[in-house]
Amino acid sequence: MEALANNLQVLFQGLALGSIYALVALGFVLIIRATNVVNFAQGDFAMLGGYAMILFTVGMPGNPELHIPGFAMHVPYGVAILLAAVVMAIIGLAFNYGVYYPLRNRSFLPVLISTLGASIFLQNTVLALFNPQPRPLDKLFNIEGVTIGGVFLDSQYLVILVFTILAVAFQYFFFEHTLIGKKLQATSQDKDMARLLGIPVTLMIIITFVYSAVLGGLAGMLVAPILFVSIGMGSTIALKAFAATIIGGFGDVAGAIVGGIIIGVIESFAAYYISVPYKDAYAFLALFLVLLFRPQGIFGEKVSEKA
Amino acid sequence: MSAAAATPVALARARSNIPGLILLAILAIAFPLVPYVLHVSDYVLNICMNSVSYTMAVLGMVVVLGYAGQINLAQAAFFGIGAYAVGLGTVVWGLHFWVSFMLGLGAAAIAGLVLGLTTLRLGGHYLAMITISFQQIFDLVLTNWIDVTKGPDGIPGIEPPALLGFHLTDKRAYLLFCAAVLYLLIWFVWWLPKTRLGRAMRAVRDNELAAETIGVHTLRTKVIAFTISAVLGGIGGSFYAAGFSYISPDNFSFLRSIEFLTAVLLGGAQSPFGAALGTVLIVLLPEWLRFLKSLYLAVYGLGVILIMVFLAEGIWGLLRNTFQRIRKPVAPVIGAVPVLHFEIKAQSDRAVLKLENLQKHFGGLRAVDGIDVEVAAGTVHALIGPNGSGKTTSLNVVNGIYRPTAGRIFLDGIDVTQMKPHERAGLGMGRTFQNIRLFQTMTALENVMVGGQRDNNPMEGGREALVTRALSALDFVGILHRAHMIVRSLPYGHQRLVEIARALAAHPKLLLLDEPGAGLNQTEKQELVGLLKRLRGHGLTLFLIDHDMGVVEKVSDRITVLNFGKKIAEGTPQEVLRHPDVIAAYLGEGPANAAARA
């Protein structure tokens, strides 16, 4: 009985963790579909979201070496989330213009490398501005959680699960049932054709970057109370989220969610039963196996280039 | 160029920049000797050692990224494999330096090979992701598998090797030795693009599909490039470990991989000299930019973006382009080359190409729905049909880009249905593309040489024969004078001819032409018809698809008409073009059309 409860406990944690990977993976997939490029700074959106929350709720000391003053703004948690989302939207806009736009007519490789550069830039800017020490963030609700049948359900984990379900539902509705969603889909499938049909392609890509920055930021805000906010928090999440998109099927929305959950659960169980220090390696091992035996991923289709 | 007496190979010799090479050689020889002449501090020696060992790893990036166009974000891991082999081998396991060194190279090569084989089929983003994963796992193992790797404490006390009885314990002597090795490696990387393998790599980078189709084993080429890169990383790491006598996991992190990547991009990924330049800058920049303090890495990240936006070919590429602009334009090739020889067996009744009940379905769409075609030796056979009738799909199935849903394909009596495109090319199936697919950054001559280097090309002799063959092919299509031009800069019509020459250099038994007339003006079309007739005159078998009835009618012996994936007519041009079904398929049926015809 206790073994079952333990396993359920591990499963629950895996699902919550997987939801975070899924959220970041969704941001990945959107950008892949709109621009055909993997954004290696997607995880840093999560990191920035986490830091924004810290700034708006408890504040942070600055860096005396560079004469950067500290910053604090003690607004209520809900307002902080809204403010942080606005900050993320602005960052997404800047990211589009600074990192993607100048390279939009080049092959995927320069853009990919450019996003890697952006990732280094974002992490180290935050590091230079503020103290490198990891920061804790309060949970959304001021309760620890509930225990059901010997399984402790942490309130923040529940928040993560609920938010992920809402985000997925919203995204489905947005893309399938709104005109702007359809335009975004058209842009992602054939930019030239979309442009000929009068769809403002540049604007659509801006929307994609803004949306995925906000989504990534929200993932960071949600996971911050569990993981601590640190400079590197985004990279690890992003790598697993990217692994999730490949496992699920490159560029597939449902695949990203399922892939994310699978990785979260695998990681949770492997850390419990095998070894904690190698926790971060299991996702990658799963990825290797998928690439060996089903390279197109779970939902992916085999496609070949047209002559 | 004294053209009259020049041999074909002399004609093909690219211009070299003698003063530049002498300058480089002087710099290269002077660099490791400076510490012997002037007094330099240990700090400067360390910077030199850093530059030398890093450059070795960055040379690997030139091969994999610059030549083969594949990303590698785990070069620091391969560097680390070499370093840990030497560290663990000499200090912990008590092995001889050179034994450990070889172990390291072996391990790096195997890791590169395994990674390459699993992911290079997929390429692109997958490769980026998998190499990052490998880098992360490598980090985790170094840090956590303490029993073997000594964990975060690292390995101290690594000693430089002995060479022919000399102990290279003096830092200056060791630097001199490493610089010599580095120069050898630079020479190797500089020489590589001019080889068969190097041309194949560049072809894969420029247009993978075309490379595969004309006989380059693309997967093998990419895997070899990746493995060479891994080994170069391993070599660099080995010398690094012995040079600094202490290694720890921090030296081989993901950030170091990015550093190697940045070095090659900054310097110029196309050239080993660019790699050396980029590496030296990447080693020196943190020293110069100390005033930025903790902002350094942020500026560095910004720098990566700026390099991508403003320095697409790196500093070396920029220098070279500027230099070339002030020099004379490429001299046209004039001179006598042998006439193109067609290796064609005596006419037989056997079909050179035979399609049996060929089918290709995409989901529910039957793009090709059971066609039978026989292309007789020495004839020109055309496949025509309205848009969407399955012509290009058929051609892609014949040539192996698509696997057929059902049916069989025979090339000169050999069943090739299950073969990959490059295997078919190796049996003598040549092809051109509707939307020209050349290797854009290579010269016309190099493009044609890649075509000529297919497997089983019936050709005696080595490189010289290949060059001659390629020049003859260019001469045959009438653009020998353009041989040394980069194809990107050629006009469209000439690009099409380069593509045909590329196919001809391979001695094709069968040449597939996908809308050879597309995009040509009337004069160029006339010339094309003339060229196709000449090819037919030499007994070459052609299978072509085209919309342009003018072209098809003039050159074809036999025409097959497709509509909705099925064959609706076949025969001589006169028979087929009067066939009522064909007219209906092209012009539509019914009264509305009768008016149009009137």
Image: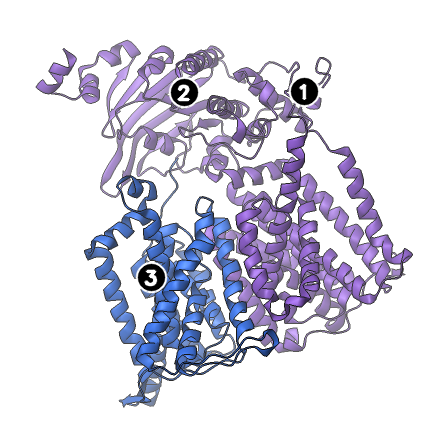
Chain colours: A blue, B purple
Q: Above or below — where is A100 with respect to A155? A: above
Camera sees residue B121: no
Depth check, mark 3 against mark 1: the one in front is: 3
Residue A209 at x, y percent in the picture: 37, 58
The residues tagged by marks 2 and 1 sit, at their Cα atoms, a distance apart of 30 Å
Q: Is residue B562 left or right of residue B202?
A: left
Q: Which subunit holds the residue at mark 3?
A: A
Q: Which residue is mark 2?
A: B520
Type of amino acid under label 3: Tyr
As drawn, the residue found furthest toward the left would be B591
Front residue of B285/B584: it is B285
Camera sees residue B255: yes
The residues tagged by marks 3 and 1 sit, at their Cα atoms, a distance apart of 60 Å
Q: Residue at x 79, y 55 (%)?
A: B178
Q: Residue at x 42, y 74 (%)?
A: A52
Q: Residue at x 40, y 71 (%)?
A: A49
Q: Which subunit holds the residue at mark 1?
A: B
For label 2, the crowd category at 10 Å Cα-Cα, with few meaning under 14, some 14 to 19 and many 20 or more, is some
Q: Residue at x 38, y 22 (%)?
A: B544
Residue B554 at x, y percent in the picture: 36, 10
Q: Which residue is mark 1?
A: B8
Residue A62 at x, y percent in the picture: 53, 78
Depth check, mark 2 against mark 1: the one in front is: 2
Give whichever of discs 2 and 1 has the lower sequence position. Answer: 1
Residues behind callouts 3 and 2 on a single chain = no
Q: Above or below — where is A55 with respect to B383? A: below
Q: Which residue is mark 3?
A: A211
Type of amino acid under label 2: Leu
Q: Which subunit holds the residue at mark 2?
A: B
Type of amino acid under label 1: Pro
